[in-house]
Protein backbone atom coordinates (compact mmCIF):
# COMPACT_ATOMS: atom_id res chain seq x y z
CA UNK A 1 0.00 0.00 0.00
CA UNK A 2 2.83 2.43 0.87
CA UNK A 3 4.54 1.65 -2.44
CA UNK A 4 1.35 2.51 -4.33
CA UNK A 5 0.95 5.70 -2.29
CA UNK A 6 4.52 6.71 -3.10
CA UNK A 7 3.83 6.36 -6.82
CA UNK A 8 0.53 8.25 -6.58
CA UNK A 9 2.14 11.15 -4.69
CA UNK A 10 4.53 11.92 -7.56
CA UNK A 11 3.63 14.96 -9.67
CA UNK A 12 4.17 12.97 -12.86
CA UNK A 13 1.35 10.67 -11.79
CA UNK A 14 -1.42 13.26 -11.70
CA UNK A 15 -0.94 15.55 -14.69
CA UNK A 16 -0.98 12.85 -17.41
CA UNK A 17 -4.20 11.40 -15.96
CA UNK A 18 -5.81 14.82 -15.69
CA UNK A 19 -4.77 15.68 -19.24
CA UNK A 20 -6.06 12.37 -20.63
CA UNK A 21 -9.59 13.62 -21.59
CA UNK A 22 -8.11 16.52 -23.57
CA UNK A 23 -5.50 14.25 -25.16
CA UNK A 24 -8.24 11.77 -26.04
CA UNK A 25 -10.26 14.42 -27.90
CA UNK A 26 -7.10 15.64 -29.61
CA UNK A 27 -6.33 12.09 -30.73
CA UNK A 28 -9.84 11.65 -32.16
CA UNK A 29 -9.59 14.91 -34.06
CA UNK A 30 -6.23 13.94 -35.55
CA UNK A 31 -7.60 10.55 -36.56
CA UNK A 32 -10.67 12.15 -38.12
CA UNK A 33 -12.95 10.20 -35.79
CA UNK A 34 -14.90 13.16 -34.43
CA UNK A 35 -17.51 12.88 -37.13
CA UNK A 36 -19.61 10.61 -34.96
CA UNK A 37 -19.56 13.21 -32.20
CA UNK A 38 -22.11 16.00 -32.20
CA UNK A 39 -21.00 19.42 -31.05
CA UNK A 40 -23.22 19.05 -27.99
CA UNK A 41 -21.56 15.69 -27.24
CA UNK A 42 -18.17 17.39 -26.98
CA UNK A 43 -19.69 20.03 -24.73
CA UNK A 44 -21.14 17.35 -22.47
CA UNK A 45 -17.84 15.44 -22.46
CA UNK A 46 -15.81 18.38 -21.17
CA UNK A 47 -18.58 19.52 -18.82
CA UNK A 48 -18.84 16.07 -17.25
CA UNK A 49 -15.06 15.89 -16.96
CA UNK A 50 -15.00 19.22 -15.10
CA UNK A 51 -17.74 18.14 -12.71
CA UNK A 52 -16.04 14.77 -12.13
CA UNK A 53 -12.82 16.57 -11.13
CA UNK A 54 -14.79 18.81 -8.77
CA UNK A 55 -16.61 15.90 -7.12
CA UNK A 56 -13.38 13.94 -6.72
CA UNK A 57 -11.46 16.78 -5.08
CA UNK A 58 -14.34 17.51 -2.68
CA UNK A 59 -14.59 13.83 -1.72
CA UNK A 60 -10.97 13.93 -0.56
CA UNK A 61 -11.84 16.15 2.42
CA UNK A 62 -14.19 13.71 4.20
CA UNK A 63 -12.05 10.75 3.12
CA UNK A 64 -9.04 12.39 4.78
CA UNK A 65 -11.03 12.77 8.01
CA UNK A 66 -12.47 9.25 7.97
CA UNK A 67 -9.22 7.51 6.97
CA UNK A 68 -6.33 9.72 8.18
CA UNK A 69 -3.91 6.78 8.25
CA UNK A 70 -4.54 5.54 4.71
CA UNK A 71 -1.43 6.44 2.72
CA UNK A 72 -3.30 6.38 -0.62
CA UNK A 73 -5.75 9.05 0.61
CA UNK A 74 -2.85 11.20 1.79
CA UNK A 75 -1.08 10.72 -1.55
CA UNK A 76 -4.17 11.79 -3.50
CA UNK A 77 -4.48 14.91 -1.32
CA UNK A 78 -1.13 16.05 -2.68
CA UNK A 79 -2.82 16.63 -6.05
CA UNK A 80 -5.81 18.68 -4.84
CA UNK A 81 -4.64 21.85 -6.57
CA UNK A 82 -3.85 20.06 -9.82
CA UNK A 83 -7.32 18.48 -9.85
CA UNK A 84 -8.95 21.83 -9.08
CA UNK A 85 -7.04 23.57 -11.87
CA UNK A 86 -8.08 20.82 -14.29
CA UNK A 87 -11.71 21.28 -13.23
CA UNK A 88 -11.58 24.97 -14.17
CA UNK A 89 -9.82 24.35 -17.49
CA UNK A 90 -12.34 21.71 -18.60
CA UNK A 91 -15.24 23.89 -17.46
CA UNK A 92 -13.78 26.79 -19.44
CA UNK A 93 -13.50 24.65 -22.57
CA UNK A 94 -17.09 23.49 -22.04
CA UNK A 95 -18.17 27.16 -21.98
CA UNK A 96 -15.94 27.98 -24.96
CA UNK A 97 -17.63 25.31 -27.08
CA UNK A 98 -21.03 26.79 -26.23
CA UNK A 99 -19.94 30.31 -27.18
CA UNK A 100 -18.15 29.09 -30.31
CA UNK A 101 -21.21 27.34 -31.72
CA UNK A 102 -23.36 30.47 -31.42
CA UNK A 103 -23.77 32.45 -34.63
CA UNK A 104 -23.47 35.80 -32.83
CA UNK A 105 -23.45 37.34 -29.35
CA UNK A 106 -27.08 38.28 -29.93
CA UNK A 107 -28.00 34.59 -30.07
CA UNK A 108 -26.28 34.01 -26.72
CA UNK A 109 -28.26 36.88 -25.18
CA UNK A 110 -31.49 35.39 -26.56
CA UNK A 111 -30.61 32.01 -25.03
CA UNK A 112 -30.26 33.61 -21.60
CA UNK A 113 -33.66 35.25 -22.04
CA UNK A 114 -35.38 31.94 -22.76
CA UNK A 115 -37.22 30.64 -19.63
CA UNK A 116 -36.50 27.03 -20.59
CA UNK A 117 -32.75 27.75 -20.67
CA UNK A 118 -32.53 29.10 -17.11
CA UNK A 119 -29.83 26.49 -16.41
CA UNK A 120 -27.41 28.69 -18.39
CA UNK A 121 -27.37 31.14 -15.49
CA UNK A 122 -26.25 28.34 -13.18
CA UNK A 123 -23.47 27.42 -15.58
CA UNK A 124 -22.26 31.02 -15.84
CA UNK A 125 -22.39 31.49 -12.06
CA UNK A 126 -20.50 28.25 -11.47
CA UNK A 127 -17.75 29.23 -13.91
CA UNK A 128 -17.45 32.68 -12.30
CA UNK A 129 -17.03 31.09 -8.87
CA UNK A 130 -14.28 28.82 -10.19
CA UNK A 131 -12.26 31.76 -11.57
CA UNK A 132 -10.95 33.12 -8.21
CA UNK A 133 -10.23 29.57 -7.06
CA UNK A 134 -8.18 28.95 -10.20
CA UNK A 135 -6.28 32.23 -9.90
CA UNK A 136 -5.37 31.61 -6.24
CA UNK A 137 -4.39 27.93 -6.49
CA UNK A 138 -0.72 28.67 -5.90
CA UNK A 139 1.71 29.24 -3.02
CA UNK A 140 2.08 32.93 -3.88
CA UNK A 141 -1.61 33.52 -3.17
CA UNK A 142 -1.52 31.50 0.05
CA UNK A 143 1.32 33.60 1.46
CA UNK A 144 -0.03 36.99 0.37
CA UNK A 145 -3.69 36.39 1.24
CA UNK A 146 -2.66 34.70 4.50
CA UNK A 147 -3.64 31.10 4.92
CA UNK A 148 -6.87 31.64 6.91
CA UNK A 149 -8.32 34.02 4.27
CA UNK A 150 -7.16 31.80 1.42
CA UNK A 151 -8.91 28.86 3.10
CA UNK A 152 -12.11 30.83 3.52
CA UNK A 153 -12.05 31.91 -0.12
CA UNK A 154 -11.70 28.34 -1.30
CA UNK A 155 -14.74 27.22 0.67
CA UNK A 156 -16.93 28.78 -2.03
CA UNK A 157 -16.13 25.63 -3.99
CA UNK A 158 -19.06 24.00 -2.15
CA UNK A 159 -21.39 26.68 -3.49
CA UNK A 160 -19.91 26.13 -6.96
CA UNK A 161 -20.62 22.40 -6.65
CA UNK A 162 -24.29 23.03 -5.82
CA UNK A 163 -24.68 25.49 -8.70
CA UNK A 164 -23.06 23.10 -11.19
CA UNK A 165 -25.38 20.35 -9.92
CA UNK A 166 -28.32 22.56 -10.86
CA UNK A 167 -26.72 23.42 -14.21
CA UNK A 168 -26.30 19.79 -15.21
CA UNK A 169 -29.47 18.43 -13.61
CA UNK A 170 -31.74 20.95 -15.33
CA UNK A 171 -29.62 21.30 -18.46
CA UNK A 172 -30.49 20.56 -22.03
CA UNK A 173 -30.80 16.82 -21.35
CA UNK A 174 -32.75 17.36 -18.08
CA UNK A 175 -30.81 14.48 -16.53
CA UNK A 176 -31.61 15.14 -12.88
CA UNK A 177 -31.45 11.46 -11.90
CA UNK A 178 -28.13 10.92 -13.68
CA UNK A 179 -26.71 14.06 -12.05
CA UNK A 180 -27.85 12.81 -8.65
CA UNK A 181 -26.04 9.51 -9.24
CA UNK A 182 -22.95 11.43 -10.32
CA UNK A 183 -22.93 13.49 -7.11
CA UNK A 184 -24.01 10.57 -4.89
CA UNK A 185 -20.51 9.72 -3.51
CA UNK A 186 -19.99 13.34 -2.46
CA UNK A 187 -23.49 13.59 -0.96
CA UNK A 188 -23.01 10.37 1.04
CA UNK A 189 -19.54 11.31 2.33
CA UNK A 190 -20.53 14.85 3.30
CA UNK A 191 -23.71 13.58 5.00
CA UNK A 192 -21.67 11.10 7.03
CA UNK A 193 -19.15 13.79 7.92
CA UNK A 194 -21.82 16.26 9.03
CA UNK A 195 -23.60 13.50 10.94
CA UNK A 196 -20.43 12.49 12.74
CA UNK A 197 -19.66 16.08 13.70
CA UNK A 198 -23.21 16.53 14.97
CA UNK A 199 -23.01 13.39 17.12
CA UNK A 200 -19.68 14.53 18.54
CA UNK A 201 -21.24 17.84 19.52
CA UNK A 202 -24.25 16.03 20.98
CA UNK A 203 -22.50 13.40 23.08
CA UNK A 204 -19.01 14.74 23.67
CA UNK A 205 -18.24 17.55 26.03
CA UNK A 206 -16.31 20.11 24.04
CA UNK A 207 -14.82 23.03 25.97
CA UNK A 208 -15.65 26.49 24.66
CA UNK A 209 -12.00 27.43 24.74
CA UNK A 210 -8.69 25.73 25.12
CA UNK A 211 -7.93 25.34 28.81
CA UNK A 212 -4.43 26.33 29.89
CA UNK A 213 -2.33 23.97 31.97
CA UNK A 214 -2.35 24.59 35.71
CA UNK A 215 0.97 26.04 36.96
CA UNK A 216 2.70 24.06 39.71
CA UNK A 217 3.14 27.26 41.77
CA UNK A 218 1.28 30.53 41.54
CA UNK A 219 3.84 33.23 42.32
CA UNK A 220 7.44 33.85 41.32
CA UNK A 221 10.23 31.93 43.05
CA UNK A 222 13.93 32.62 43.32
CA UNK A 223 16.29 30.29 41.46
CA UNK A 224 20.06 30.39 41.48
CA UNK A 225 22.27 29.67 38.49
CA UNK A 226 24.04 26.44 39.42
CA UNK A 227 26.03 26.01 36.21
CA UNK A 228 26.54 27.64 32.80
CA UNK A 229 27.59 25.54 29.79
CA UNK A 230 28.77 27.07 26.52
CA UNK A 231 26.98 25.05 23.82
CA UNK A 232 28.16 27.10 20.81
CA UNK A 233 29.43 30.55 19.88
CA UNK A 234 25.94 31.96 20.41
CA UNK A 235 24.15 29.58 22.79
CA UNK A 236 24.66 29.11 26.54
CA UNK A 237 22.78 26.63 28.73
CA UNK A 238 21.82 27.78 32.23
CA UNK A 239 21.21 25.14 34.93
CA UNK A 240 18.84 26.52 37.57
CA UNK A 241 18.18 25.25 41.08
CA UNK A 242 15.59 26.61 43.55
CA UNK A 243 16.86 29.02 46.15
CA UNK A 244 14.27 27.81 48.64
CA UNK A 245 14.21 24.29 49.97
CA UNK A 246 11.37 22.59 48.13
CA UNK A 247 11.11 19.62 45.82
CA UNK A 248 11.50 20.74 42.24
CA UNK A 249 8.16 20.02 40.50
CA UNK A 250 8.09 18.12 37.25
CA UNK A 251 6.91 19.63 34.00
CA UNK A 252 5.75 18.42 30.63
CA UNK A 253 8.45 18.08 27.96
CA UNK A 254 8.15 21.10 25.69
CA UNK A 255 7.01 23.61 28.32
CA UNK A 256 8.76 26.89 29.13
CA UNK A 257 9.71 29.08 32.09
CA UNK A 258 8.81 32.76 32.44
CA UNK A 259 11.52 35.02 33.87
CA UNK A 260 11.38 38.48 35.42
CA UNK A 261 14.77 40.14 35.03
CA UNK A 262 15.98 43.21 36.91
CA UNK A 263 18.28 44.58 34.21
CA UNK A 264 20.40 47.64 35.04
CA UNK A 265 19.23 50.69 33.13
CA UNK A 266 15.67 49.41 32.69
CA UNK A 267 12.90 51.16 34.62
CA UNK A 268 10.68 48.07 34.73
CA UNK A 269 11.27 44.38 35.01
CA UNK A 270 11.95 42.68 31.70
CA UNK A 271 9.76 39.62 31.18
CA UNK A 272 10.87 36.83 28.87
CA UNK A 273 9.94 33.19 28.28
CA UNK A 274 12.51 30.47 27.55
CA UNK A 275 11.81 26.83 26.78
CA UNK A 276 13.11 24.13 29.08
CA UNK A 277 15.68 22.23 27.05
CA UNK A 278 16.08 19.02 29.04
CA UNK A 279 13.85 16.16 30.10
CA UNK A 280 11.82 16.48 33.30
CA UNK A 281 12.76 14.50 36.37
CA UNK A 282 16.11 16.14 37.19
CA UNK A 283 17.08 18.19 40.24
CA UNK A 284 17.49 21.27 38.04
CA UNK A 285 15.76 23.23 35.32
CA UNK A 286 17.76 23.96 32.17
CA UNK A 287 17.25 26.64 29.56
CA UNK A 288 19.43 27.14 26.48
CA UNK A 289 19.53 30.76 25.34
CA UNK A 290 20.83 32.16 22.08
CA UNK A 291 22.45 35.59 22.08
CA UNK A 292 20.26 37.67 19.77
CA UNK A 293 22.45 39.98 17.65
CA UNK A 294 21.20 43.08 15.82
CA UNK A 295 19.26 42.30 12.61
CA UNK A 296 21.59 41.62 9.67
CA UNK A 297 19.90 44.25 7.53
CA UNK A 298 19.91 46.82 10.39
CA UNK A 299 23.17 46.42 12.33
CA UNK A 300 22.66 49.81 13.98
CA UNK A 301 19.83 48.40 16.13
CA UNK A 302 20.64 47.10 19.63
CA UNK A 303 21.03 43.36 20.29
CA UNK A 304 18.52 41.32 22.26
CA UNK A 305 18.08 42.83 25.72
CA UNK A 306 17.46 39.75 27.86
CA UNK A 307 19.75 37.39 25.93
CA UNK A 308 22.64 39.87 26.18
CA UNK A 309 21.96 40.23 29.90
CA UNK A 310 22.06 36.46 30.42
CA UNK A 311 25.22 35.99 28.36
CA UNK A 312 27.17 38.99 29.65
CA UNK A 313 26.05 39.63 33.23
CA UNK A 314 24.55 36.46 34.69
CA UNK A 315 27.19 34.30 36.37
CA UNK A 316 27.19 31.16 38.50
CA UNK A 317 25.33 31.85 41.75
CA UNK A 318 23.21 34.65 40.26
CA UNK A 319 19.61 34.75 41.54
CA UNK A 320 16.73 34.96 39.05
CA UNK A 321 12.96 35.34 39.52
CA UNK A 322 11.12 32.47 37.83
CA UNK A 323 7.45 31.64 37.30
CA UNK A 324 6.24 28.04 37.14
CA UNK A 325 6.65 25.88 34.02
CA UNK A 326 3.80 26.45 31.62
CA UNK A 327 2.73 26.05 28.01
CA UNK A 328 0.60 23.75 25.91
CA UNK A 329 3.24 22.76 23.33
CA UNK A 330 4.22 19.48 24.93
CA UNK A 331 4.05 15.73 24.55
CA UNK A 332 0.90 14.15 25.98
CA UNK A 333 1.21 12.30 29.27
CA UNK A 334 -0.68 9.38 27.79
CA UNK A 335 -1.57 8.17 24.35
CA UNK A 336 0.42 7.16 21.34
CA UNK A 337 4.03 8.25 21.43
CA UNK A 338 5.30 5.77 18.88
CA UNK A 339 4.93 7.75 15.63
CA UNK A 340 6.38 11.22 16.09
CA UNK A 341 8.27 13.71 13.94
CA UNK A 342 10.09 16.45 15.87
CA UNK A 343 11.54 19.45 14.04
CA UNK A 344 13.72 22.16 15.54
CA UNK A 345 15.24 25.01 13.56
CA UNK A 346 17.87 27.24 15.13
CA UNK A 347 17.23 27.86 18.81
CA UNK A 348 13.75 26.42 18.19
CA UNK A 349 15.35 23.06 18.95
CA UNK A 350 15.02 23.66 22.71
CA UNK A 351 11.41 22.49 23.32
CA UNK A 352 11.66 19.52 20.95
CA UNK A 353 15.03 18.60 22.48
CA UNK A 354 13.23 18.38 25.82
CA UNK A 355 10.74 16.03 24.16
CA UNK A 356 13.50 13.93 22.61
CA UNK A 357 15.38 13.65 25.91
CA UNK A 358 12.17 12.61 27.64
CA UNK A 359 11.49 9.86 25.08
CA UNK A 360 15.07 8.65 25.41
CA UNK A 361 14.95 8.74 29.19
CA UNK A 362 11.60 6.92 29.28
CA UNK A 363 12.77 4.37 26.71
CA UNK A 364 11.73 4.38 23.07
CA UNK A 365 9.69 1.23 22.70
CA UNK A 366 10.09 -1.45 20.06
CA UNK A 367 8.02 -0.72 16.98
CA UNK A 368 8.22 3.05 17.47
CA UNK A 369 8.99 5.28 14.53
CA UNK A 370 10.59 8.49 15.82
CA UNK A 371 12.15 11.13 13.55
CA UNK A 372 14.16 14.16 14.64
CA UNK A 373 15.08 16.97 12.21
CA UNK A 374 17.42 19.76 13.30
CA UNK A 375 18.18 22.70 11.02
CA UNK A 376 20.98 25.26 11.53
CA UNK A 377 23.27 27.32 9.29
CA UNK A 378 26.46 25.35 9.98
CA UNK A 379 28.50 23.52 12.58
CA UNK A 380 29.42 26.66 14.51
CA UNK A 381 25.74 27.20 15.36
CA UNK A 382 24.83 23.58 16.12
CA UNK A 383 24.34 22.69 19.77
CA UNK A 384 24.35 19.32 21.56
CA UNK A 385 26.12 17.63 18.63
CA UNK A 386 27.62 14.74 20.62
CA UNK A 387 24.50 14.40 22.73
CA UNK A 388 22.27 14.00 19.67
CA UNK A 389 24.65 11.46 18.14
CA UNK A 390 24.70 9.38 21.32
CA UNK A 391 20.90 9.34 21.55
CA UNK A 392 20.59 8.31 17.89
CA UNK A 393 23.14 5.52 18.36
CA UNK A 394 21.37 4.25 21.49
CA UNK A 395 17.92 4.08 19.86
CA UNK A 396 17.54 2.11 16.67
CA UNK A 397 13.95 3.32 16.29
CA UNK A 398 15.10 6.96 16.18
CA UNK A 399 16.19 8.58 12.91
CA UNK A 400 18.27 11.75 13.26
CA UNK A 401 18.66 14.20 10.37
CA UNK A 402 20.81 17.29 10.89
CA UNK A 403 20.47 19.89 8.12
CA UNK A 404 22.98 22.68 7.42
CA UNK A 405 21.64 25.47 5.21
CA UNK A 406 25.10 27.04 4.68
CA UNK A 407 27.81 24.54 5.74
CA UNK A 408 31.30 25.90 6.38
CA UNK A 409 34.41 24.49 4.72
CA UNK A 410 35.31 22.41 7.76
CA UNK A 411 31.82 20.88 8.04
CA UNK A 412 31.79 17.30 6.75
CA UNK A 413 28.72 15.84 5.07
CA UNK A 414 27.83 12.49 6.62
CA UNK A 415 29.88 13.21 9.72
CA UNK A 416 28.78 16.61 11.05
CA UNK A 417 25.50 16.83 9.17
CA UNK A 418 23.31 14.66 6.95
CA UNK A 419 21.59 17.07 4.54
CA UNK A 420 22.57 20.37 2.95
CA UNK A 421 19.55 22.65 2.87
CA UNK A 422 16.70 23.79 5.07
CA UNK A 423 14.07 21.70 6.78
CA UNK A 424 11.03 21.96 4.52
CA UNK A 425 7.90 20.06 3.58
CA UNK A 426 9.55 18.82 0.38
CA UNK A 427 12.38 17.37 2.47
CA UNK A 428 9.90 15.64 4.79
CA UNK A 429 8.08 14.13 1.81
CA UNK A 430 11.36 12.81 0.41
CA UNK A 431 12.52 11.20 3.66
CA UNK A 432 9.44 10.17 5.64
CA UNK A 433 7.60 6.98 4.63
CA UNK A 434 4.29 8.88 4.72
CA UNK A 435 2.34 11.41 6.76
CA UNK A 436 0.98 9.09 9.47
CA UNK A 437 2.77 10.93 12.29
CA UNK A 438 2.24 13.49 15.01
CA UNK A 439 4.33 16.53 14.06
CA UNK A 440 5.97 18.78 16.68
CA UNK A 441 7.99 21.72 15.37
CA UNK A 442 9.45 25.01 16.53
CA UNK A 443 11.60 27.60 14.79
CA UNK A 444 11.50 30.85 12.80
CA UNK A 445 8.05 32.14 11.90
CA UNK A 446 8.28 31.78 8.09
CA UNK A 447 9.51 28.18 8.33
CA UNK A 448 6.73 27.25 10.71
CA UNK A 449 4.04 28.98 8.65
CA UNK A 450 5.16 27.02 5.58
CA UNK A 451 5.20 23.74 7.52
CA UNK A 452 1.80 24.31 9.14
CA UNK A 453 0.20 25.08 5.77
CA UNK A 454 2.09 22.37 3.91
CA UNK A 455 1.27 19.61 6.39
CA UNK A 456 -2.41 20.50 6.15
CA UNK A 457 -2.31 20.34 2.36
CA UNK A 458 -0.40 17.04 2.62
CA UNK A 459 -3.39 15.58 4.42
CA UNK A 460 -2.14 15.61 8.01
CA UNK A 461 -5.07 15.97 10.42
CA UNK A 462 -5.13 19.28 12.27
CA UNK A 463 -5.03 17.60 15.69
CA UNK A 464 -1.71 15.96 14.74
CA UNK A 465 0.03 19.26 13.94
CA UNK A 466 1.66 20.86 17.00
CA UNK A 467 3.87 23.94 16.96
CA UNK A 468 5.19 26.79 19.04
CA UNK A 469 6.52 30.17 17.98
CA UNK A 470 8.80 32.38 20.03
CA UNK A 471 7.63 35.94 20.71
CA UNK A 472 5.69 37.92 18.10
CA UNK A 473 6.57 35.57 15.25
CA UNK A 474 3.45 33.51 15.75
CA UNK A 475 1.76 31.03 13.47
CA UNK A 476 -2.00 30.73 13.54
CA UNK A 477 -3.71 27.39 13.20
CA UNK A 478 -6.67 27.57 10.90
CA UNK A 479 -9.06 26.19 13.51
CA UNK A 480 -7.84 28.75 16.08
CA UNK A 481 -8.01 31.73 13.78
CA UNK A 482 -11.26 33.05 15.25
CA UNK A 483 -11.62 36.75 14.65
CA UNK A 484 -14.48 39.14 15.17
CA UNK A 485 -16.25 39.89 11.91
CA UNK A 486 -17.96 42.98 13.37
CA UNK A 487 -16.45 46.44 13.62
CA UNK A 488 -15.94 47.77 17.13
CA UNK A 489 -14.80 51.09 18.57
CA UNK A 490 -11.65 50.89 20.70
CA UNK A 491 -10.87 53.87 22.94
CA UNK A 492 -7.43 54.40 24.50
CA UNK A 493 -7.88 56.78 27.45
CA UNK A 494 -4.30 58.06 27.79
CA UNK A 495 -4.03 59.13 24.15
CA UNK A 496 -7.70 59.91 23.69
CA UNK A 497 -7.70 58.00 20.41
CA UNK A 498 -10.86 56.22 19.30
CA UNK A 499 -10.13 53.68 16.58
CA UNK A 500 -12.20 51.17 14.62
CA UNK A 501 -11.37 47.50 15.02
CA UNK A 502 -11.98 45.57 11.77
CA UNK A 503 -10.57 42.17 12.74
CA UNK A 504 -7.37 42.39 10.69
CA UNK A 505 -4.94 42.52 13.64
CA UNK A 506 -4.14 39.35 15.55
CA UNK A 507 -4.60 40.98 18.97
CA UNK A 508 -5.50 44.22 20.71
CA UNK A 509 -1.78 44.82 21.29
CA UNK A 510 -0.95 44.50 17.58
CA UNK A 511 -3.92 46.75 16.78
CA UNK A 512 -2.57 49.44 19.13
CA UNK A 513 0.97 49.18 17.76
CA UNK A 514 -0.30 49.41 14.17
CA UNK A 515 -1.93 52.72 15.09
CA UNK A 516 1.13 54.21 16.79
CA UNK A 517 0.10 53.49 20.39
CA UNK A 518 2.77 51.98 22.64
CA UNK A 519 1.56 49.47 25.23
CA UNK A 520 3.66 47.38 27.63
CA UNK A 521 4.27 43.73 26.78
CA UNK A 522 6.49 40.82 27.70
CA UNK A 523 6.07 37.38 26.18
CA UNK A 524 3.32 38.37 23.67
CA UNK A 525 1.79 34.92 24.18
CA UNK A 526 -0.51 35.39 27.20
CA UNK A 527 1.90 33.80 29.63
CA UNK A 528 3.43 36.54 31.78
CA UNK A 529 0.79 39.23 32.41
CA UNK A 530 3.05 42.16 31.47
CA UNK A 531 0.52 43.44 28.92
CA UNK A 532 -2.40 43.49 31.39
CA UNK A 533 -4.51 46.64 30.98
CA UNK A 534 -7.57 47.90 32.84
CA UNK A 535 -10.73 47.31 30.81
CA UNK A 536 -12.87 50.36 31.59
CA UNK A 537 -15.77 49.29 29.39
CA UNK A 538 -16.74 46.43 27.10
CA UNK A 539 -15.74 42.81 26.64
CA UNK A 540 -12.83 40.98 25.02
CA UNK A 541 -12.45 37.48 23.62
CA UNK A 542 -9.45 35.13 23.81
CA UNK A 543 -9.20 32.96 20.65
CA UNK A 544 -6.76 30.77 22.59
CA UNK A 545 -6.98 30.81 26.38
CA UNK A 546 -3.91 32.49 27.93
CA UNK A 547 -1.81 30.75 30.55
CA UNK A 548 -1.83 33.86 32.75
CA UNK A 549 -5.13 34.87 34.38
CA UNK A 550 -5.50 38.67 34.65
CA UNK A 551 -7.14 40.42 37.59
CA UNK A 552 -10.86 41.12 37.55
CA UNK A 553 -11.56 44.06 35.25
CA UNK A 554 -8.28 43.68 33.35
CA UNK A 555 -7.41 42.04 30.03
CA UNK A 556 -4.29 40.73 28.32
CA UNK A 557 -3.89 42.85 25.20
CA UNK A 558 -1.37 40.47 23.59
CA UNK A 559 -3.84 37.59 23.29
CA UNK A 560 -7.29 39.20 23.32
CA UNK A 561 -9.49 40.78 20.67
CA UNK A 562 -12.53 43.04 21.15
CA UNK A 563 -15.91 41.33 21.49
CA UNK A 564 -17.75 44.67 21.74
CA UNK A 565 -16.92 48.37 21.86
CA UNK A 566 -14.16 48.62 24.48
CA UNK A 567 -12.33 51.30 26.45
CA UNK A 568 -8.83 50.76 27.84
CA UNK A 569 -7.28 52.86 30.59
CA UNK A 570 -3.98 52.88 28.69
Image (tube, rainbow, N blue to C red):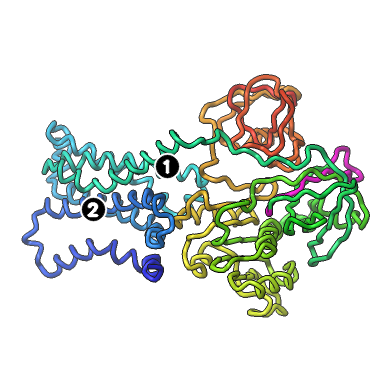
Q: Position of residue 78 (x, y in %)?
A: 41, 59
Left or right: where does residue 300 sit relative to residue 178? right
Residue holding disc 1: 153
Residue appearing at x 8%, y 54% in the figure: 38
Q: Within 10 Å of the Cα at label 2, are there few (<14), some (14-19), or many (20+) other Cα atoms?
A: some
Lower position in the chain sequence, tag 1 or tag 2: 2
Q: Within 10 Å of the Cα at label 1, are there few (<14), some (14-19), or many (20+) other Cα atoms?
A: some
Up the image or down, 421 lies above or below 463; here it is below
Q: Position of residue 452 (x, y in %)?
A: 54, 53
Residue appearing at x 36%, y 69% in the figure: 4
Residue holding disc 2: 93
Q: Nearer the viewer, residue 521 or 286?
A: 286
Residue 266 is inside the magenta segment: yes
Q: Which secondary structure is most common in the magenta stretch?
A: loop
Q: Is label 1 in a helix, a strand or a loop?
A: helix
> Is any part of residue 11 visible from this angle?
no
Q: Is label 2 in a helix, a strand or a loop?
A: helix
Q: Which residues are magenta?
A: 253-269
Up the image or down, 364 lies above or below 557; here it is below
Which quadrant, please, contains the C terminus? Answer: top right
Amino acid sequence: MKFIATIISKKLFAWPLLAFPALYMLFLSMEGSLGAWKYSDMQDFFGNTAISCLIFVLCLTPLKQFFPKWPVIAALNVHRRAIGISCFLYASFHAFLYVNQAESPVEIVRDFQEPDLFYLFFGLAGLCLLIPLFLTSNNFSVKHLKYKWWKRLHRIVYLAAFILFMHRGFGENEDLFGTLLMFLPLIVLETLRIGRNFLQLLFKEIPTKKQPPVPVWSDEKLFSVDKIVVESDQVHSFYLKPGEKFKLPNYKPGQFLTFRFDIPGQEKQVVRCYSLSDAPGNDYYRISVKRIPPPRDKPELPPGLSSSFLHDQVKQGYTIKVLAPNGSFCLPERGKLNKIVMIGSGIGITPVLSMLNHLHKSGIKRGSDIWFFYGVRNGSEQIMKDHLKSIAQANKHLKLHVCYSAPAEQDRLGEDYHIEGRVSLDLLKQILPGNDFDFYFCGPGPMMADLAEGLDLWGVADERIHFEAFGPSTVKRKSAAVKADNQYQVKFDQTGKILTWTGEAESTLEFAEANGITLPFGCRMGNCGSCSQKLVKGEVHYPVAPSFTPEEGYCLTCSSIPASDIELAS
